Amino acid sequence: MRIALFVTCLADAMFPRAAIATVTLLERLGHEVVFPERQTCCGQMHVNTGYAREALGLVRRHVEVFEEAGCDAVVAPSGSCVGSVRHQHAAVARRFGDERLAARAEAVAARTYELSELLVDVLGVGDVGAYYPHRVTYHPTCHSLRMLRVGDKPLRLLRHVRGLTLLELADADSCCGFGGTFAVKNADTSTAMLADKMTRVIGTGAEVCTAGDSSCLMHIGGGLSRLRSGVRTVHLAEILAATDTTAARA
């Protein structure tokens, strides 16, 4: 299968290892991955903060770039950004009267997947041949859980990783408190939510907390680091891309 990588702003600017791991994993499984270099922000942060008109041009560019890629599927290491493509792009186009763009956006969205969705639902893979000898707990991010409804797909993939001990996270479906600008505009509430999440993560005895969104991992990881908890945050893609050799260096 020929797959286009939708890298996302956060992976591109701050967490490139998640994007690199996505490519490494898919190529190891025998697929061709291409990177459309003209891609930019998908416009999610604009829509979420009330700047829908400013997002329109970004939606148009995203559609054009991934149409031109001519791939069977588009993948992103982010449930949040895939959620935006599926649930916001066509709506933004229609809001400003561009029905043709809305239809094109829907076509691109129909073949755009979060990583675990692509692996399980499209490629039919459960065991990706990963090896990661660590105690790991999984945080289901809000957009992947509630917008994309990925369900237990990430957990199914993690259960097949050799050497990995998967530890259940209490109240796993509670928000970590990030929510993009929510963490800035409602800092006290966000901090309280983060404290609850960190207490539960630390309570598992895990060495690593994983998730499918770098944004949530950034929030949780920052808090865990300030506590000197010893718990690291690692993107799901990095765990699934790990092998005997790479895990030894992790």
Image (tube, rainbow, N blue to C red):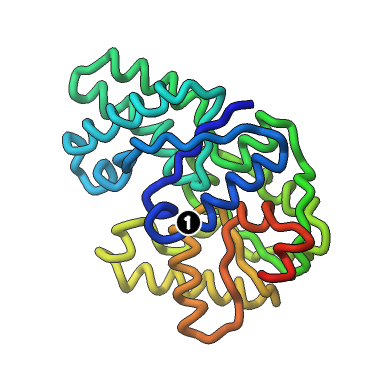
Is residue 224 placed above or below 9 in the rendered structure?
below
At horizontal 68% and vertical 45% (from top left) the residue drawn is 152
Position of 91 with respect to 72 (left or right) is left
Q: Quadrant of the C terminus?
A: bottom right
Q: Quadrant of the N terminus?
A: top right
Position of 209 with respect to 129 (left or right) is left
Q: Which residue is mark 1?
A: 16
Position of 126 with respect to 42 (left or right) is right
Q: Position of residue 34 (x, y in %)?
A: 51, 34
- Which of the 4 image quarters holds residue 89? top left
Q: Amino acid at mark 1?
A: Pro
Q: Residue furthest bottom?
A: 228
Looking at the picture, tell me which residue is in the foreground, 3 or 118: 3
Looking at the picture, tell me which residue is in the foreground, 21 or 102: 21
At horizontal 49% and vertical 47% (from top left) the residue drawn is 78
At horizontal 69% and vertical 73% (from top left) the residue drawn is 206
Looking at the picture, tell me which residue is in the foreground, 87 or 232: 232
At horizontal 70% and vertical 63% (from top left) the residue drawn is 246
Looking at the picture, tell me which residue is in the foreground, 193 or 31: 31
- Which of the 4 image quarters holds residue 55? top left
Is residue 199 placed above or below 112 in the rendered structure?
below
Q: Residue furthest top?
A: 100
Q: Position of residue 244 (x, y in %)?
A: 79, 61
Q: Position of residue 96 (x, y in %)?
A: 18, 23
Q: Position of residue 48 (x, y in %)?
A: 28, 45
